[in-house]
Amino acid sequence: MTKCTANRLTRRSALQFGGALALSGLAPSMAAIAGSRIPFGAAVLLEPFRNDPQLKRMLLDHVDVIVPMNVLKWDGIRHSKKFFDFSGADELVDFAVQNGKRLHGHTLLWYNANPQWLDAITSPKRLERVLVEHIEEVVGRYAGRIGSWDVVNEVVAHDPLNQGKWRTSVWYNVLGPKHVDIAFSTAARTDPTARLYINDYDLEDDSLRTKARQEAILKIVHRLQRKNIPVHGVGLQAHLYAERKIGRENLARFIDQLHRLGLDVAVTEMDIIDWKLPADKAIRDAAVAAKTREFLSALTASTTPRAISTWGLNDRYSWIGDVFPRDDQARARPLPFDRDWNAKPMFDAIREFTA
Ligand code: G3I
């Protein structure tokens, strides 16, 4: 039995709700009000997918887009230099296809989650060959099934104001900026129907660092377009800090610039970092839902994202508690469902934009 307390919005109640929210400045996009649904996606970890039957149930009942969380990364597929291991990825892809769910691929190039043998490559020729071979094999295998890809993930430096535009990685160190060109052109050539994204975090507030990160993304998009290399969208990871304000106007300006370049936007990894919130669960859950609404209302005021995806569904399988531990040791509550699969206010907030 699905434990789900969330109410689905009817079109009529959405219209009433949208009207009320418009007055409060928190209106969903016209697309959401008019009933053209924004797909809801979730990243899926293989272990709970195999061992927690409720996860499959929830995916079937609530999720439109499945994002394999780790199994498509290099250390998921290329842990051995000698062969490609698609066993984990195939499990998630088969489940999605058999159940009529869309798939978003994460990711073809990252500075992290690389096998040691890859990080040890120092020859530009060899690294380019390995990258091209990898993308041809992976994108080719899932062509027609994985409809969109985070082609490159987090290639912008954490703080471009102090570190330069590019993220240090084996890719950048050995190949320079052209690693991004190679990744996009190979993906486009291998599956010309796939939608190709540049995916990154900290693009949602209005700090100087975020503005520099947005600028860096725009420059990379310009670079690709100057070279006639296809790029279709930017993935906003949206690992949002509950204590940081969304930069509503800055986000709108960034999205407008992306639209002018012909790109769309997707929310790819949303969760709410609750480490600074009060311990009380009800207060925390309300604040997490409020941040979700603040972000999605700002976003949908300027665009209709291709999808809104969370980084997992259930607090039990989230990375947030490990990386952003609370001082009081309380468990993190960053996702739409709690550890026992009860829907939280965050789920209701997401459904206002996706149902
Ligand atoms: O599955 C094994 C488990 O069997 C073993 O007992 C355990 C011991 O450490 O490790 C488990 O694997 C871990 C896996 O997460 C599943 O929990 C890996 O060590 C760990 O490296 C892996 O971390 C993932 C990380 O990316 C690196 O790939 C996180 O789950 C995942 O949430 C995180 O996702 C990233 C996105 O790709 C990019 N954006 C940021 C986001 C959060 O860091």
Image: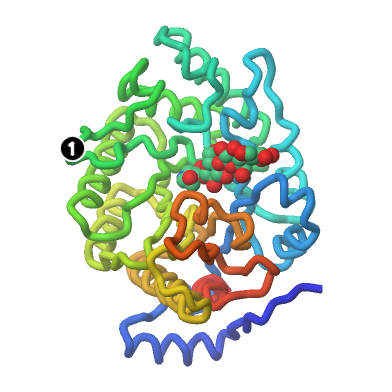
Q: Position of residue 311 (x, y in %)?
A: 54, 55
169 vs 286, left or right, is left
| Colour setting | rainbow
Residue 41 x, y percent position in the rendering: 58, 58
Q: Which residue occupies 65% across, 48% down? A: 45
Task: Please state which of residues 268 and 76 is positioned toward the viewer in this rendering.
Answer: 76
The amino acid type found where label 1 is placed reads: Asn
Snapshot quadrant of residue 105: top right
For disc 1, does the CB lie below 8 Å from ligand 1? Answer: no
Is residue 82 visible from the viewing direction of this image?
Answer: yes
- Quadrant in the picture for residue 145: top right
Q: Secondary structure at mark 1?
A: helix
| Vertical position of residue 198 compared to residue 269: above or below | above
Quick one: label 1, few (<14), some, or many (20+) residues within 10 Å?
A: few
Q: Quadrant of ligand 1?
A: top right
The x, y position of residue 280, in whole percent, is: 49, 78
Question: Which quadrant, please, contains the N terminus?
Answer: bottom right
Q: Quadrant of the C terminus?
A: bottom right
The residue at 62%/29% (across/down) is 138
Q: Is residue 106 visible?
A: no
Location of residue 133 with respect to 344 vertically, above or below: above
Residue in view at x 72 percent, y 46 percent: 47
The outermost residue toward the front is 328
Where residue 314 sits, quadrant-wise, is: bottom right
The residue lying at 69 percent from left, 17 percent from top is: 83
Q: Which residue is mark 1?
A: 162
